[in-house]
Image: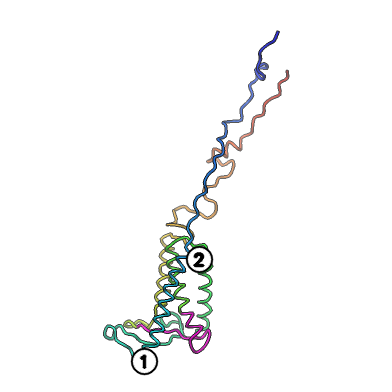
């Protein structure tokens, strides 16, 4: 006599299950990489650099030192001066130190630009880069000599020190970067930084994490089928 029995039922034992079936792996398209902004940074810097160089060449050719040319009375004038200091005639007498600092700034901005994502940071850094390079050209190639060259300034407004195109570009770019930092705009992200963002892997859970059902399931012991004594 042949009995129709199903293995596992003859002994009255039920094979334990290992839990709900895992869903099949579905390929997930990687998130699109944010667009790099090095090109925008260099474009802004190039515009500032060209404006600075051209206006300085014209100022040297058309203006005479010590003879201001009126634009708006005595308040706004074209006034040609040679500046051995930093922007707006600050730190005069430290020409070679300022040259080395400006060179380091240029190198740092170009290196940082490879990771740049924010267009606003690209604008700010481009303004600084263009202005720094414009004044560096004077430091290297104008008298009295390399690393000690005096910067050409030509625009005077009221009591403000005489300046050139590069000076407000550097200062304006620095102010823009400070404002961006205060309002949560990072150079390597698009848009504002969200509250609660932390460095490191965000949202990644470890196996066994109580808030992760997958982790809890993975931490439970797996039931093994018992051997059928028959």
- Find numbered disc 2 in the image and state the secondary structure of the residue it sits on: helix
Return the x and y of residue 51 as percentages of the image width and height.
Answer: 40, 77
Magenta residue check for 196: no
Q: Give the position of the C terminus as an image quadrant.
A: top right
**Which residue is disc 2 drawn over?**
113
CA neighbours of label 2 inside 10 A, class few (<14), some (14 to 19), many (20+)? many
Return the x and y of residue 176 as percentages of the image width and height.
Answer: 41, 67
Q: Is residue 158 left or right of residue 56?
A: left
Relative depth, front residue between 22 and 42:
42
Magenta residue check for 138: yes
User: From what the image shows, is residue 120 above or below residue 141?
Assistant: above
CA neighbours of label 1 inside 10 A, class few (<14), some (14 to 19), many (20+)? few
Identify the image quadrant of residue 157: bottom left
**Which residue is disc 1 drawn over?**
66
Identify the image quadrant of residue 74: bottom left
User: From what the image shows, is residue 6 above or below residue 36?
Assistant: above
Residue bounds of the magenta highlight: 135-155
Relative depth, front residue between 13 and 43:
43
- The residue located at (42%, 84%) in the rendering is 152
Q: Furthest residue to the right?
A: 230
- Find numbered disc 1 in the image and state the secondary structure of the residue it sits on: loop
Which of the two labelled residues, at mark 2 and mark 1, occupies the earlier sequence position? 1
Q: Give the position of the N terminus as an image quadrant.
A: top right
Q: Are marks 2 and 1 in contact (CB under 8 Å)?
A: no
- The residue located at (41%, 69%) in the rendering is 175
- The residue located at (57%, 34%) in the rendering is 22
Q: Is residue 169 left or right of residue 111?
A: left
- The residue located at (49%, 60%) in the rendering is 36
Return the x and y of residue 156 as percentages of the image width and height.
Answer: 34, 83
User: From what the image shows, is residue 46 above or below residue 214?
Assistant: below
């Amino acid at each position: 006599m042949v009995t129709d029995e199903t293995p596992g039922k003859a002994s009255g034992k039920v094979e334990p299950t290992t839990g709900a079936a895992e869903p099949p792996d579905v390929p997930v398209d990687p998130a699109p990489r944010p667009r790099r902004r090095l090109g925008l940074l260099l474009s802004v810097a190039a515009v500032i650099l060209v404006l600075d160089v051209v206006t300085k060449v014209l100022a040297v050719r058309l203006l005479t030192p010590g003879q201001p040319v009126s634009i708006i009375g005595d308040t706004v004038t074209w006034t040609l001066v040679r500046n051995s200091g930093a922007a707006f005639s600050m730190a005069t007498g430290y020409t070679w130190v300022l040259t080395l600092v400006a060179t380091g700034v240029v190198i740092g901005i170009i290196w940082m630009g490879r990771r740049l994502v924010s267009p606003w940071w690209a604008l700010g850094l481009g303004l600084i880069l263009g202005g720094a390079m414009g004044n560096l050209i004077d430091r290297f190639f104008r008298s009295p000599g390399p690393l000690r060259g005096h910067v050409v300034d030509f625009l005077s407004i009221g009591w403000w020190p005489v300046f050139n195109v590069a000076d407000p570009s550097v200062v304006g770019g620095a102010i823009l970067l400070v404002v961006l930092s205060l309002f949560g705009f990072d150079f390597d992200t698009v848009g504002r930084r969200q509250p609660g963002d932390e460095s490191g892997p965000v949202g990644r859970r470890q196996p066994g994490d109580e808030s992760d059902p997958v982790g809890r399931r993975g931490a439970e012991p797996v039931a093994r089928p018992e051997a059928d004594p028959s």
